[in-house]
Amino acid sequence: MTNERDDARGDEQGHAEGEVGSRMRRGLLQGAGLGAALAMMGGMVSSPAQAAEAAFPSHKRWKIVFVNHVTTNPFFVPTQYGIQDACAMMNMDYQWTGSANADVGEMVNAMNAAIAAKADAIAVPIVDPKAFDGPVQKALDAGIPVFSYNADAPSGGKNNRLAYIGQDLYLSGYQMGERIVSLIDSGLVGLFIATPGQLNIQPRLDGATDAIKKSGKKIDIQTIATGATVNEELSKIKSFYLGHQDLKGMFAVDAGSTQGVAQVIKESKLTEKGVHGGGFDLLPTTIQLIKEGFLDFTIDQQPYVQGFYTVVEAFTYLASGGLVGPANINTGLKFVTKSSVDPYLSTSTRYEGKSTKAQIVPRSGPIKS
């Protein structure tokens, strides 16, 4: 796993190889849609690959710069794979840059550098309610489209990004709060957040808190800041538990803290004491510990498509001269529990960040919502 993550993180300036793009194009064009596509093209092409190549006229190899707030966080490994795959399909380049430890100043500097370098498009998680207003407008004034992903500016503000690709963060937190209330009647509950105030996770904490308070149950909420790195998060969670061993639940609103909650519950045998836990995202340790019964749930927000769809939106905007899109895309909310976790353990793909290999994953049986 480590080598695969390093491979994704280390591609600071890269783009996926044409061979990957060819495989992806062939896969997308196979099936019932191929005949119709060929018919529409008047029989002028003889293979799926040629059909894909003929879909758009030749164009500049546009470059999209992805600014990120935690560039080495394992959550964004599948996001980077999604970026790579979409760039390979769309004949684009990308850059992965920003801050390794949620430093907004470093992110703003990365945006300004992308503007100065005349990037064709910029994507950025708007994790601060005001800091990105100026850089976004500066980019737009320079003719560079800007998209937010993973985190967005508050509605009614002054940020003019073109579209948001990501989860409805407050709603996901509210639904987590409702799940907490269904598990716990009273007592101390720790809510863990990596970086309080940042817009990629603070709305989840707000939503969870509101749902718990609305329930009227005698649940004592304590909020704990854990930090931007996985090791730091684990340490803070351990410290909180050791000082509050009468707690009834531990829940987190970010990937690293969720993994840390699961690890502490397992190491301290808290399920035997009736302690509940849950959180967000699909880090491998989190998924395994759900299977083993140490977490009640995690929430999938599909990081792969947060990268993939952002590239596609940028491409369609650039290819159409701004006539097509942009549009907000909600990447969804899905509770993963012990009863539904098996598919996440039985596959190893780019889509959840566990493999570098490009592949089509077969499935069978009824589709469950």
Image (tube, rainbow, N blue to C red):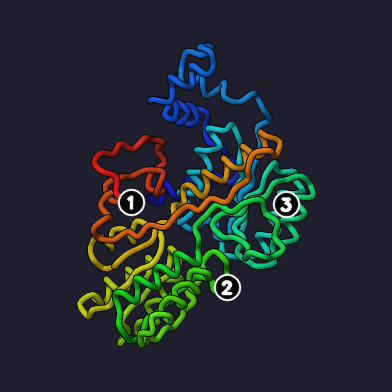
Q: x%, y% of residue 266?
A: 27, 71
134 left or right of 260 in image: right
Amino acid type assigned to the residue bearing label 2 in the image: Gly
Amino acid type assigned to the residue bearing label 3 in the image: Ala
Say which residue appears at 53% left-offset and 33% top-offset: 88
When asked about the image quadrant of residue 132, the answer is bottom right
Label 1: element kind: loop
Q: x%, y% of residue 319?
A: 66, 33
Sequence-first disc among 2 and 1: 2
Q: What residue sits right under mark 3 in the picture?
A: 113
Q: x%, y% of residue 263?
A: 32, 69
Dot label at residue 197: 2
Sequence-first disc among 3 and 1: 3
Say which residue appears at 39% left-offset and 82% top-offset: 240
Front position in the image: 366 or 299: 366
Can the viewer see residue 67 in this picture?
Answer: no
Q: What residue sits right under mark 1 in the picture?
A: 369
Find the distance from the CA under tag 2 to the CA under tag 1: 32 Å
